[in-house]
Image (cartoon, coloured by chain):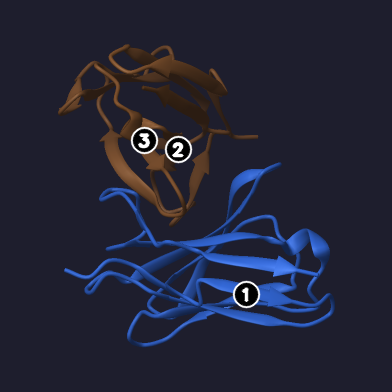
Chain colours: A blue, B brown
Amino acid sequence: KAGVTQTPRYLIKTRGQQVTLSCSPISGHRSVSWYQQTPGQGLQFLFEYFSETQRNKGNFPGRFSGRQFSNSRSEMNVSTLELGDSALYLCASSPDGTGAYGYTFGSGTRLTVV
Amino acid sequence: EDKVVQSPLSLVVHEGDTVTLNCSYEVTNFRSLLWYKQEKKAPTFLFMLTSSGIEKKSGRLSSILDKKELFSILNITATQTGDSAVYLCAASYAGGTSYGKLTFGQGTILTVHP
């Protein structure tokens, strides 16, 4: 079955702009989690969505937001971009987000803010 | 604060060597310990360990969890250049308080020379 699909693969944005990233989970998976990966901080949890509801949120400012659609696809939005938002953004798919079945990651979106 | 610590942070070996990667954790409501291999972008799943003392094996890779001492090891025997990657361990959570969340270690960068 198809894996986790993230688009776009690469993005270059200017400070102050906003950006939207997309994640399509494995078919049948209803939970999508988002992570930010940077050389200094490693992989950090942003938030998780299940059945169009955000159930969990990490310690990121309100500029980071997301949503999930009825087909389980999820989008993540970052507003008022800062240079420090440059990172690899990964999403993870799981059947229910409980951790019982593990998590499958997409290939990520590399965001560069200039 | 939940914490996952990996050691060593980097390791350089020659083909054919055996390596042991370490992961210790201090996590409330711990469910499982997961190992991932990250070569370019997508972390790819290796193992999920939930029970203590039961070794999981996949080819030349094996892993075990010690829930009393709060650590896990990942062993790779007869290393090959294709094993060069960042190896990540992560803790998942039980109960309904941390849906979709993994807490990651910093990663171990493994370099295998021919």
Does mark 2 fall on the same chain as mark 3? yes
Q: Disc 3 marks which amino acid?
A: Trp
Residue at left offset 42%, top offset 86%: A69
- Decide: few, some or many residues near mark 1? Use Cα within 10 Å; few <14, some 14-19, many ≥20: some
Q: Mark 3 highlights which residue?
A: B35
- Decide: few, some or many residues near mark 3? Use Cα within 10 Å; few <14, some 14-19, many ≥20: many
Q: Disc 1 marks which amino acid?
A: Leu
For the question of whether residue B3 can be seen, the reply is yes
Q: Could you tell me which chain the residue with mark 1 belongs to?
A: A
Say whether disc 3 or disc 2 marks the residue closer to the N-terminus. Answer: 3
Q: Mark 1 highlights which residue?
A: A11
Examine the image and state in which quarter residue B26 appears: top right
Residue at left offset 34%, top offset 49%: A99
Residue at left offset 57%, top offset 23%: B9
Q: Mark 2 highlights which residue?
A: B90
Q: Position of residue A2 (x, y in %)?
A: 22, 70
In the rendered view, does B67 fall on the left or right side of A12? left
Q: Which mark, by number, is residue A73?
A: none
On-image quarter of the C terminus of chain A: bottom right
Q: Nearer the viewer, residue B54 or B93?
A: B54
Q: Secondary structure at mark 3?
A: strand
Does mark 2 fall on the same chain as mark 1? no
Q: Position of residue A92 (x, y in %)?
A: 41, 60
Q: Are marks 3 and 2 in contact (CB under 8 Å)?
A: yes
Q: Position of residue B3 (x, y in %)?
A: 59, 31
Give the residue at the far bottom of this rendering: A70
